[in-house]
Image: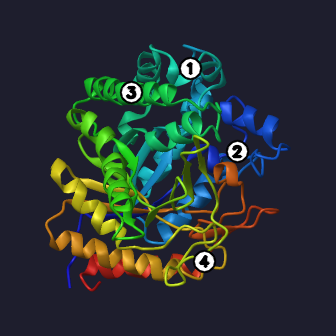
Protein backbone atom coordinates (compact mmCIF):
# COMPACT_ATOMS: atom_id res chain seq x y z
CA UNK A 1 0.00 0.00 0.00
CA UNK A 2 1.38 3.40 -0.97
CA UNK A 3 0.73 6.66 0.84
CA UNK A 4 0.11 9.51 -1.55
CA UNK A 5 2.35 12.51 -0.81
CA UNK A 6 0.71 15.07 1.44
CA UNK A 7 1.14 17.63 -1.32
CA UNK A 8 -0.68 15.49 -3.91
CA UNK A 9 -3.54 17.34 -5.60
CA UNK A 10 -6.98 15.87 -6.26
CA UNK A 11 -9.74 17.65 -8.08
CA UNK A 12 -11.77 18.04 -11.25
CA UNK A 13 -11.77 20.07 -14.44
CA UNK A 14 -14.04 22.21 -16.60
CA UNK A 15 -13.59 24.54 -19.57
CA UNK A 16 -15.20 27.92 -20.12
CA UNK A 17 -17.20 27.37 -23.31
CA UNK A 18 -18.50 24.05 -22.04
CA UNK A 19 -19.90 25.39 -18.76
CA UNK A 20 -20.07 29.20 -18.63
CA UNK A 21 -22.60 29.92 -21.37
CA UNK A 22 -23.26 32.81 -23.78
CA UNK A 23 -19.83 32.79 -25.40
CA UNK A 24 -21.26 34.91 -28.20
CA UNK A 25 -18.01 36.40 -29.49
CA UNK A 26 -16.33 33.06 -30.20
CA UNK A 27 -15.90 31.11 -33.42
CA UNK A 28 -17.63 28.11 -31.82
CA UNK A 29 -20.77 30.12 -30.98
CA UNK A 30 -21.04 31.42 -34.55
CA UNK A 31 -20.41 27.93 -35.95
CA UNK A 32 -23.02 26.29 -33.70
CA UNK A 33 -25.78 28.68 -34.80
CA UNK A 34 -24.98 28.06 -38.45
CA UNK A 35 -24.39 24.30 -38.35
CA UNK A 36 -26.81 22.87 -35.76
CA UNK A 37 -29.56 22.08 -38.28
CA UNK A 38 -27.23 20.48 -40.81
CA UNK A 39 -26.77 16.65 -40.97
CA UNK A 40 -23.12 16.71 -39.92
CA UNK A 41 -23.43 19.65 -37.55
CA UNK A 42 -23.40 19.75 -33.74
CA UNK A 43 -26.31 18.13 -31.90
CA UNK A 44 -26.96 21.19 -29.73
CA UNK A 45 -25.99 24.82 -29.38
CA UNK A 46 -24.16 25.67 -26.19
CA UNK A 47 -26.53 28.48 -25.18
CA UNK A 48 -26.35 29.10 -21.45
CA UNK A 49 -24.38 25.82 -21.10
CA UNK A 50 -24.37 25.28 -17.30
CA UNK A 51 -24.51 28.99 -16.41
CA UNK A 52 -21.26 28.72 -14.51
CA UNK A 53 -20.58 32.37 -15.30
CA UNK A 54 -23.20 33.07 -12.63
CA UNK A 55 -22.99 29.82 -10.65
CA UNK A 56 -19.21 29.47 -10.16
CA UNK A 57 -19.44 29.91 -6.38
CA UNK A 58 -22.01 27.13 -6.12
CA UNK A 59 -19.79 24.82 -8.16
CA UNK A 60 -16.67 25.58 -6.16
CA UNK A 61 -18.50 24.97 -2.87
CA UNK A 62 -19.47 21.59 -4.34
CA UNK A 63 -15.84 20.87 -5.22
CA UNK A 64 -14.67 21.85 -1.75
CA UNK A 65 -17.33 19.70 -0.06
CA UNK A 66 -16.26 16.78 -2.24
CA UNK A 67 -12.72 17.02 -0.89
CA UNK A 68 -11.03 18.63 -3.89
CA UNK A 69 -7.89 20.66 -3.29
CA UNK A 70 -7.29 21.67 -6.92
CA UNK A 71 -9.43 22.65 -9.87
CA UNK A 72 -8.81 23.26 -13.56
CA UNK A 73 -10.70 25.98 -15.43
CA UNK A 74 -10.11 27.91 -18.63
CA UNK A 75 -10.11 31.62 -19.25
CA UNK A 76 -12.26 32.45 -22.28
CA UNK A 77 -10.16 34.43 -24.76
CA UNK A 78 -13.29 35.46 -26.70
CA UNK A 79 -14.62 37.21 -23.58
CA UNK A 80 -11.29 38.82 -22.69
CA UNK A 81 -10.33 40.27 -26.08
CA UNK A 82 -13.58 41.26 -27.79
CA UNK A 83 -11.77 43.34 -30.40
CA UNK A 84 -8.18 42.83 -31.49
CA UNK A 85 -5.84 44.53 -29.07
CA UNK A 86 -8.63 45.76 -26.76
CA UNK A 87 -9.09 43.90 -23.49
CA UNK A 88 -12.34 43.69 -21.54
CA UNK A 89 -11.72 44.80 -17.98
CA UNK A 90 -15.17 43.64 -16.89
CA UNK A 91 -14.34 40.06 -17.92
CA UNK A 92 -10.99 40.24 -16.16
CA UNK A 93 -12.69 41.38 -12.95
CA UNK A 94 -15.09 38.46 -13.26
CA UNK A 95 -12.27 35.93 -13.62
CA UNK A 96 -10.51 37.56 -10.69
CA UNK A 97 -13.60 36.78 -8.60
CA UNK A 98 -13.63 33.22 -9.95
CA UNK A 99 -9.99 32.60 -9.10
CA UNK A 100 -10.21 34.35 -5.76
CA UNK A 101 -13.14 32.10 -4.86
CA UNK A 102 -10.92 29.07 -5.46
CA UNK A 103 -7.97 30.67 -3.62
CA UNK A 104 -10.17 31.42 -0.59
CA UNK A 105 -11.12 27.74 -0.42
CA UNK A 106 -7.46 26.64 -0.56
CA UNK A 107 -8.08 25.03 -3.93
CA UNK A 108 -5.05 25.19 -6.24
CA UNK A 109 -5.81 26.67 -9.66
CA UNK A 110 -4.86 25.20 -13.04
CA UNK A 111 -5.77 27.72 -15.73
CA UNK A 112 -5.94 27.02 -19.45
CA UNK A 113 -5.68 30.03 -21.76
CA UNK A 114 -6.91 28.38 -24.98
CA UNK A 115 -9.38 25.50 -24.77
CA UNK A 116 -10.50 25.09 -28.41
CA UNK A 117 -12.44 28.38 -28.76
CA UNK A 118 -11.14 31.53 -30.48
CA UNK A 119 -12.29 35.14 -30.54
CA UNK A 120 -14.33 35.49 -33.71
CA UNK A 121 -12.19 38.34 -35.01
CA UNK A 122 -9.08 36.14 -34.74
CA UNK A 123 -10.76 33.15 -36.38
CA UNK A 124 -12.00 35.33 -39.29
CA UNK A 125 -8.42 36.48 -39.90
CA UNK A 126 -7.11 32.91 -40.10
CA UNK A 127 -6.61 31.92 -36.48
CA UNK A 128 -3.58 29.78 -35.82
CA UNK A 129 -2.91 29.52 -39.57
CA UNK A 130 -1.55 33.05 -39.36
CA UNK A 131 2.22 33.34 -39.26
CA UNK A 132 1.90 35.99 -36.55
CA UNK A 133 -0.54 33.93 -34.43
CA UNK A 134 2.09 33.20 -31.73
CA UNK A 135 2.58 36.95 -31.29
CA UNK A 136 -1.19 37.55 -31.06
CA UNK A 137 -1.73 34.67 -28.62
CA UNK A 138 1.23 35.56 -26.40
CA UNK A 139 -0.02 39.16 -26.15
CA UNK A 140 -3.26 37.80 -24.70
CA UNK A 141 -1.36 35.37 -22.43
CA UNK A 142 0.82 38.19 -21.17
CA UNK A 143 -2.21 40.33 -20.38
CA UNK A 144 -3.91 37.53 -18.42
CA UNK A 145 -0.69 36.83 -16.52
CA UNK A 146 -0.28 40.49 -15.56
CA UNK A 147 -3.88 40.87 -14.45
CA UNK A 148 -4.52 37.45 -12.87
CA UNK A 149 -1.15 35.77 -12.39
CA UNK A 150 -1.09 36.13 -8.62
CA UNK A 151 -4.30 34.05 -8.42
CA UNK A 152 -3.05 31.27 -10.72
CA UNK A 153 -0.93 28.37 -9.48
CA UNK A 154 -0.39 26.61 -12.83
CA UNK A 155 -0.66 28.05 -16.35
CA UNK A 156 -1.58 25.76 -19.27
CA UNK A 157 -1.39 27.91 -22.41
CA UNK A 158 -2.92 25.46 -24.91
CA UNK A 159 -5.27 22.52 -24.40
CA UNK A 160 -4.82 19.35 -26.49
CA UNK A 161 -3.16 20.82 -29.61
CA UNK A 162 -3.34 17.53 -31.55
CA UNK A 163 -7.09 17.22 -30.93
CA UNK A 164 -7.64 20.81 -32.06
CA UNK A 165 -5.59 20.28 -35.21
CA UNK A 166 -7.18 16.92 -36.02
CA UNK A 167 -10.79 18.03 -35.54
CA UNK A 168 -10.47 21.47 -37.09
CA UNK A 169 -7.87 21.07 -39.83
CA UNK A 170 -7.51 17.39 -40.70
CA UNK A 171 -10.96 15.82 -40.61
CA UNK A 172 -12.84 19.14 -40.64
CA UNK A 173 -15.56 18.24 -38.15
CA UNK A 174 -14.97 21.29 -35.92
CA UNK A 175 -14.49 24.93 -36.91
CA UNK A 176 -12.92 26.09 -39.14
CA UNK A 177 -13.78 22.80 -40.93
CA UNK A 178 -10.67 22.53 -43.08
CA UNK A 179 -9.40 19.23 -44.48
CA UNK A 180 -5.75 19.77 -45.29
CA UNK A 181 -2.64 17.91 -44.19
CA UNK A 182 -0.56 20.96 -45.05
CA UNK A 183 -2.75 23.30 -42.98
CA UNK A 184 -2.82 20.88 -40.04
CA UNK A 185 0.99 20.75 -39.93
CA UNK A 186 1.22 24.52 -40.23
CA UNK A 187 -1.28 25.08 -37.40
CA UNK A 188 0.44 22.51 -35.17
CA UNK A 189 3.79 24.28 -35.62
CA UNK A 190 2.16 27.60 -34.77
CA UNK A 191 0.64 26.10 -31.62
CA UNK A 192 4.11 24.94 -30.56
CA UNK A 193 5.46 28.43 -31.22
CA UNK A 194 2.51 29.97 -29.38
CA UNK A 195 3.12 27.86 -26.27
CA UNK A 196 6.82 28.67 -26.23
CA UNK A 197 6.28 32.39 -26.74
CA UNK A 198 3.54 32.48 -24.10
CA UNK A 199 5.88 30.71 -21.68
CA UNK A 200 8.49 33.42 -22.18
CA UNK A 201 5.98 36.22 -21.69
CA UNK A 202 4.40 34.71 -18.57
CA UNK A 203 7.66 33.81 -16.83
CA UNK A 204 9.14 37.21 -17.73
CA UNK A 205 6.41 38.80 -15.62
CA UNK A 206 7.26 36.55 -12.68
CA UNK A 207 9.90 33.82 -12.75
CA UNK A 208 7.96 31.93 -10.08
CA UNK A 209 4.95 31.42 -12.35
CA UNK A 210 4.64 27.78 -13.41
CA UNK A 211 3.78 27.01 -17.04
CA UNK A 212 3.36 23.61 -18.68
CA UNK A 213 2.28 22.01 -21.98
CA UNK A 214 -0.82 19.87 -22.29
CA UNK A 215 -1.74 16.96 -24.54
CA UNK A 216 -4.35 14.25 -24.78
CA UNK A 217 -2.24 11.10 -24.98
CA UNK A 218 -3.81 7.81 -26.12
CA UNK A 219 -2.34 4.35 -25.67
CA UNK A 220 -2.62 1.97 -28.62
CA UNK A 221 -2.19 -1.78 -28.84
CA UNK A 222 -2.54 -3.95 -31.98
CA UNK A 223 -5.86 -5.73 -32.39
CA UNK A 224 -3.99 -8.55 -34.12
CA UNK A 225 -0.65 -9.08 -32.38
CA UNK A 226 0.48 -11.26 -35.29
CA UNK A 227 -0.10 -8.48 -37.79
CA UNK A 228 3.03 -6.51 -38.64
CA UNK A 229 0.82 -3.67 -39.89
CA UNK A 230 -1.26 -3.49 -36.70
CA UNK A 231 1.90 -3.56 -34.59
CA UNK A 232 3.56 -0.91 -36.72
CA UNK A 233 0.54 1.40 -36.64
CA UNK A 234 0.20 1.13 -32.85
CA UNK A 235 3.91 1.86 -32.36
CA UNK A 236 3.79 4.87 -34.66
CA UNK A 237 0.51 6.06 -33.11
CA UNK A 238 1.95 5.91 -29.58
CA UNK A 239 5.01 7.86 -30.73
CA UNK A 240 3.01 10.58 -32.47
CA UNK A 241 0.44 10.67 -29.66
CA UNK A 242 3.00 11.61 -27.07
CA UNK A 243 6.24 12.86 -28.60
CA UNK A 244 6.04 15.92 -30.88
CA UNK A 245 4.40 18.58 -28.71
CA UNK A 246 6.08 17.63 -25.45
CA UNK A 247 9.45 17.34 -27.15
CA UNK A 248 9.17 20.67 -28.96
CA UNK A 249 8.08 22.48 -25.77
CA UNK A 250 10.44 20.65 -23.38
CA UNK A 251 12.57 23.76 -22.77
CA UNK A 252 9.45 25.77 -21.99
CA UNK A 253 7.90 23.52 -19.38
CA UNK A 254 7.94 23.66 -15.58
CA UNK A 255 5.61 20.66 -15.44
CA UNK A 256 3.71 18.35 -17.78
CA UNK A 257 -0.07 18.33 -18.01
CA UNK A 258 -1.63 15.22 -19.57
CA UNK A 259 -5.18 14.20 -20.46
CA UNK A 260 -5.91 10.50 -20.99
CA UNK A 261 -9.07 8.85 -22.31
CA UNK A 262 -8.12 6.33 -24.97
CA UNK A 263 -6.52 2.91 -24.49
CA UNK A 264 -7.80 0.71 -27.27
CA UNK A 265 -6.98 -1.67 -30.11
CA UNK A 266 -5.66 -0.51 -33.47
CA UNK A 267 -6.75 -2.45 -36.52
CA UNK A 268 -6.06 -2.28 -40.24
CA UNK A 269 -8.69 -3.80 -42.50
CA UNK A 270 -9.82 -3.06 -46.04
CA UNK A 271 -7.47 -0.07 -46.22
CA UNK A 272 -9.01 1.44 -43.08
CA UNK A 273 -7.19 2.17 -39.84
CA UNK A 274 -9.48 2.33 -36.80
CA UNK A 275 -8.84 3.26 -33.19
CA UNK A 276 -11.49 4.22 -30.63
CA UNK A 277 -13.81 5.64 -33.25
CA UNK A 278 -11.05 7.41 -35.17
CA UNK A 279 -11.18 6.01 -38.69
CA UNK A 280 -8.64 6.75 -41.41
CA UNK A 281 -9.97 5.60 -44.77
CA UNK A 282 -6.89 5.37 -46.99
CA UNK A 283 -8.95 4.56 -50.07
CA UNK A 284 -11.18 7.66 -49.77
CA UNK A 285 -8.44 9.74 -48.10
CA UNK A 286 -10.96 10.53 -45.44
CA UNK A 287 -10.06 11.03 -41.77
CA UNK A 288 -12.98 11.11 -39.37
CA UNK A 289 -14.02 10.79 -35.76
CA UNK A 290 -17.15 8.87 -34.98
CA UNK A 291 -19.13 8.04 -31.86
CA UNK A 292 -18.86 4.26 -31.48
CA UNK A 293 -22.30 2.66 -31.58
CA UNK A 294 -21.31 -0.98 -31.92
CA UNK A 295 -19.90 -1.95 -28.53
CA UNK A 296 -20.11 -5.68 -29.21
CA UNK A 297 -16.82 -5.93 -31.07
CA UNK A 298 -15.11 -7.19 -27.95
CA UNK A 299 -17.54 -7.91 -25.07
CA UNK A 300 -14.65 -8.13 -22.61
CA UNK A 301 -14.00 -4.40 -22.99
CA UNK A 302 -16.17 -2.12 -20.85
CA UNK A 303 -17.26 0.96 -22.79
CA UNK A 304 -18.70 4.36 -21.92
CA UNK A 305 -21.99 5.76 -23.17
CA UNK A 306 -20.24 7.01 -26.32
CA UNK A 307 -18.31 3.81 -26.88
CA UNK A 308 -14.87 4.77 -25.62
CA UNK A 309 -13.09 1.81 -24.06
CA UNK A 310 -12.57 2.01 -20.29
CA UNK A 311 -9.13 0.67 -19.44
CA UNK A 312 -7.72 2.59 -16.46
CA UNK A 313 -4.37 0.83 -16.76
CA UNK A 314 -3.62 3.14 -19.68
CA UNK A 315 -2.84 5.89 -17.20
CA UNK A 316 0.15 3.90 -15.95
CA UNK A 317 1.49 3.26 -19.45
CA UNK A 318 1.21 6.94 -20.34
CA UNK A 319 2.89 8.07 -17.11
CA UNK A 320 5.79 5.67 -17.78
CA UNK A 321 6.27 7.26 -21.21
CA UNK A 322 6.33 10.76 -19.72
CA UNK A 323 8.88 9.94 -17.03
CA UNK A 324 11.73 10.59 -19.48
CA UNK A 325 11.05 14.34 -19.45
CA UNK A 326 12.03 14.60 -15.77
CA UNK A 327 9.21 17.03 -15.03
CA UNK A 328 6.42 16.95 -12.43
CA UNK A 329 3.33 15.40 -14.03
CA UNK A 330 -0.30 16.30 -13.46
CA UNK A 331 -3.22 14.35 -14.94
CA UNK A 332 -5.52 17.25 -15.83
CA UNK A 333 -8.30 15.25 -17.51
CA UNK A 334 -9.48 11.66 -17.15
CA UNK A 335 -13.06 10.47 -17.18
CA UNK A 336 -16.00 8.89 -18.96
CA UNK A 337 -19.47 9.56 -20.29
CA UNK A 338 -21.69 7.59 -17.91
CA UNK A 339 -25.17 9.05 -17.41
CA UNK A 340 -26.33 6.21 -15.14
CA UNK A 341 -23.09 6.32 -13.09
CA UNK A 342 -22.63 2.62 -13.77
CA UNK A 343 -18.87 2.49 -14.20
CA UNK A 344 -17.49 5.80 -12.88
CA UNK A 345 -16.79 4.63 -9.31
CA UNK A 346 -15.04 1.50 -10.55
CA UNK A 347 -13.07 3.58 -13.07
CA UNK A 348 -11.85 6.09 -10.47
CA UNK A 349 -10.85 3.31 -8.05
CA UNK A 350 -8.77 1.64 -10.77
CA UNK A 351 -7.15 4.94 -11.73
CA UNK A 352 -6.13 5.38 -8.09
CA UNK A 353 -4.62 1.91 -8.14
CA UNK A 354 -2.56 2.61 -11.26
CA UNK A 355 -1.46 5.99 -9.91
CA UNK A 356 -0.18 4.11 -6.86
CA UNK A 357 1.78 1.79 -9.12
CA UNK A 358 3.27 4.81 -10.92
CA UNK A 359 4.29 6.44 -7.64
CA UNK A 360 5.93 3.21 -6.54
CA UNK A 361 7.90 3.31 -9.80
CA UNK A 362 9.26 6.74 -8.83
CA UNK A 363 7.24 8.57 -11.45
CA UNK A 364 6.89 12.19 -10.36
CA UNK A 365 3.09 12.30 -10.47
CA UNK A 366 1.70 15.16 -8.39
CA UNK A 367 -1.99 15.48 -9.15
CA UNK A 368 -5.16 14.11 -10.71
CA UNK A 369 -8.19 15.99 -12.03
CA UNK A 370 -11.32 14.12 -13.10
CA UNK A 371 -13.24 15.25 -16.17
CA UNK A 372 -15.56 16.73 -15.31
CA UNK A 373 -16.86 18.37 -12.15
CA UNK A 374 -20.29 18.82 -13.73
CA UNK A 375 -22.08 17.61 -16.86
CA UNK A 376 -21.29 20.01 -19.68
CA UNK A 377 -21.51 20.87 -23.36
CA UNK A 378 -19.41 18.17 -25.02
CA UNK A 379 -18.56 20.04 -28.21
CA UNK A 380 -20.12 18.56 -31.37
CA UNK A 381 -21.79 15.80 -29.30
CA UNK A 382 -23.84 18.39 -27.43
CA UNK A 383 -25.24 17.83 -23.93
CA UNK A 384 -26.04 14.11 -24.23
CA UNK A 385 -22.69 12.70 -22.99
CA UNK A 386 -22.68 12.97 -19.19
CA UNK A 387 -19.11 13.25 -17.91
CA UNK A 388 -19.89 14.97 -14.61
CA UNK A 389 -19.17 13.86 -11.10
CA UNK A 390 -22.24 16.02 -10.52
CA UNK A 391 -25.36 15.76 -12.64
CA UNK A 392 -26.78 18.93 -14.18
CA UNK A 393 -30.52 18.79 -14.79
CA UNK A 394 -30.89 20.52 -18.16
CA UNK A 395 -34.15 22.39 -17.51
CA UNK A 396 -33.34 23.78 -14.06
CA UNK A 397 -29.49 23.57 -14.22
CA UNK A 398 -29.64 22.18 -10.68
CA UNK A 399 -26.45 20.38 -9.61
CA UNK A 400 -26.61 17.02 -7.87
CA UNK A 401 -23.54 14.95 -6.94
CA UNK A 402 -23.62 11.41 -8.29
CA UNK A 403 -22.71 8.49 -6.05
CA UNK A 404 -19.30 8.33 -7.75
CA UNK A 405 -18.57 11.88 -6.54
CA UNK A 406 -18.76 10.61 -2.96
CA UNK A 407 -16.69 7.54 -3.81
CA UNK A 408 -14.03 9.90 -5.19
CA UNK A 409 -14.28 12.05 -2.04
CA UNK A 410 -13.74 9.02 0.19
CA UNK A 411 -10.80 7.81 -1.92
CA UNK A 412 -9.21 11.24 -1.55
CA UNK A 413 -9.56 11.06 2.23
CA UNK A 414 -8.03 7.58 2.29
CA UNK A 415 -5.18 8.61 -0.02
CA UNK A 416 -4.35 11.59 2.14
CA UNK A 417 -4.37 9.44 5.30
CA UNK A 418 -2.24 6.72 3.70
CA UNK A 419 -5.03 4.15 3.76
CA UNK A 420 -5.68 3.96 0.01
- 249 or 273, nearer to the observer: 273
Q: Look at the image and tell me whether residue 393 can be seen.
A: yes
Single out the mark in the foreground, 1 or 4: 4
- 139 or 344, nearer to the observer: 344
Count of residue discs = 4
Residue at the image position 22 percent from the left and 52 percent from the top: 328
Q: Which mark is residue 181?
A: none
Whether tag 4 and tag 2 are in contact, CB under 8 A, the answer is: no
Q: In this rendering, would 215 be left or right of 329? A: right
Q: What element carries label 3?
A: helix
Disc 4 versus disc 3: distance between alpha carbons?
A: 41 Å
**Relative to 101, does residue 344 appear above or below in the rendering?**
below
Which comes before the other along the chain, label 1 or label 3?
1
**10 Å neighbourhood of mark 3: few (<14), some, or many (≥20)?**
some
- Expressed as whole percent of the image width and height from the top left, the position of residue 418 reads 24, 81
Which residue is farthest right? Answer: 37
Single out the mark in the foreground, 1 or 3: 3
Whether tag 1 and tag 3 are in contact, CB under 8 A, the answer is: no
Whether tag 1 and tag 4 are in contact, CB under 8 A, the answer is: no
The quadrant in which the C terminus is found is: bottom left
**10 Å neighbourhood of mark 1: few (<14), some, or many (≥20)?**
some
Q: What element carries label 1?
A: loop
Q: Residue 87 carries which label?
A: 1
For label 3, the residue is: 189
Single out the mark in the foreground, 4 or 3: 3
For label 2, the residue is: 21
- Expressed as whole percent of the image width and height from the top left, the position of residue 120 reads 66, 24
Single out the mark in the foreground, 2 or 3: 3
Residue at the image position 60 percent from the left and 48 percent from the top: 288
Q: Which mark is residue 402?
A: 4
Disc 4 versus disc 2: distance between alpha carbons?
A: 23 Å
**10 Å neighbourhood of mark 4: few (<14), some, or many (≥20)?**
some
Amino acid sequence: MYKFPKTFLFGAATSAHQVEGNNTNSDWWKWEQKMVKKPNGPKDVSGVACSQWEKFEEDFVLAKNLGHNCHRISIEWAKIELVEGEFNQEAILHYKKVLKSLNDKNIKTFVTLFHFTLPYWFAKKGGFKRTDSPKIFSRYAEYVARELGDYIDFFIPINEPKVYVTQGYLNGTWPPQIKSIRSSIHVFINLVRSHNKAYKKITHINKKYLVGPNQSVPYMIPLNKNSIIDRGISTLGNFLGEFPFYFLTRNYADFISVNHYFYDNVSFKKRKISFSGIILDLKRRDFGYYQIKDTSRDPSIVRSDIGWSLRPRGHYFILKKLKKYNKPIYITESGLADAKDKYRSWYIRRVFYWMNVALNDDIDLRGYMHWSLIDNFEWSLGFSPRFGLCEVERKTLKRKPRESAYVYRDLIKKAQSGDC
